[in-house]
Amino acid sequence: MSTLHAVSGLAWLDALGPQRIRPGLSRTLSLLASLGNPQFSFSSILIGGTNGKGSTAAAISAILTAAGVPCGLYTSPHLVSVTERVRLLDRDVSPAHLDDALSLVARISSPGVRGPTYFEALTVAAFELFRRARVQTAIVEVGIGGRLDATNVLEPEVSVVTNVGADHLDVLGPTLEDVAREKAGIFRKGRPALVGMAGAEPGARAALHAEARRIGARLVEIPPLETPLPGDPLPGAHQQQNLALALAAARAVAPLDEAAVARGLAAVRWPGRLQTLSKAGFRTLLLDGAHNPPGAGALAAHLDARGLAGRVDLLFGGMADKDLAAVFAPLAARARRIVLVAPGSPRAETPETLRVRIGRPELETASSVAEGLRRLEEAGGDGPILVAGSLYLVGEVLRLRSGA
């Protein structure tokens, strides 16, 4: 493979731009048909929800892999490298293999507005890679919503909705019931639809049930685990719901013994979510991509439970289209010192505007994430630096720390 060819697919993907959202299945279906419909070469579990769908997907993949099921995992977004989005047999796809699949998608794609979005192109490439790797089951995280998301071209054996929250109301709303109906679009007739019960809003819950009846899906409400699993595979009390869903989904597609479950849970990898990062000579980091009010609430509860409230310094930044005031408030109430920054995304809110939005004009701002992190490093303290507000911010800090 030539050097030019080795980067062409990834370069083409970058040129598409990751920010466009164009709901609909037609472009994805057309591309898959041109490839001979690789999505029919494996069974699948499709996971939607406002929060927790990635954690649930990663746990399912780890459990099934430990049980000997050849798995593919497709999630979004990535933190550091786009290769994180596709795992083959529980290993991140290599840049060369991802590039090769993307090069194929590029060759069969229409140009301009008729062509795929960044997410659609990656989805098609992932399914082609799953076929090449001969995976038995693909665990696939929905991008946004469900009904019109590119991943909904699958015919999943099991559908999962972790929860229904108020994110993306401009696209999926305007009400929570509307959001629930969009997420229920991943349900399939005669097949299990697993729904998380933790904090379920009555109207959204009723909408999920109504859609399941209309579609003919077998809706099963899954309560959170009552006691933490050994080894604390995914930190945080809120993960008890995600782990319960993961176990139920994995058991629905494969026979599992307790030893396989234990091995799988010990192997779960899901960085950037209550991730503790320690490195000699630097302050400990606590990284969490909390970017909406429920996520921030779960993070705040974790700080309280671990005795970290009042001891953390907060590096905070997020996307301009998020409810940043509501995300910020519970974290700021538990922080000692705060520095506002802008993650490296065109959608990021500037620190100066962020101060106004959250009503805290006195707060410290930094011109870059690196500068903000450096200031908090130098400040010292007996608690960790908390990095939160956006997965883009978490990813940038991970890149900085890995290169430090």
Image (cartoon, rainbow, N blue to C red):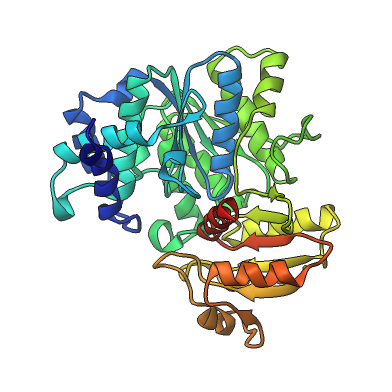
Residue 304 pos. (x, y %): 82, 58
Q: Quadrant of the C terminus?
A: bottom right
Residue toward you, 107 or 35: 107
Residue toward you, 253 or 1: 1
**Res 153 seen here:** no
User: Where 386 sits versus 145, above or below?
Assistant: below
Residue 282 pos. (x, y %): 72, 58
- Residue displayed at 48% across by 60% down: 175
Q: Quadrant of residue 100?
A: top left
The answer to whether 309 appears left or right of 157 in the picture is right
- Residue displayed at 17% across by 55% down: 113
Q: How many marks?
A: 0
Q: Quadrant of residue 252?
A: top right
The answer to whether 397 appears left or right of 230 in the picture is left
Residue toward you, 84 or 372: 372
Residue toward you, 267 or 183: 267
**Res 182 seen here:** yes
Residue 322 pos. (x, y %): 50, 67
- Residue displayed at 37% across by 37% down: 95
The answer to whether 362 appears left or right of 308 in the picture is left
Q: Quadrant of the N terminus?
A: top left
Residue 233 pos. (x, y %): 71, 35
- Identity of the residue furthest to the bottom in this view: 361
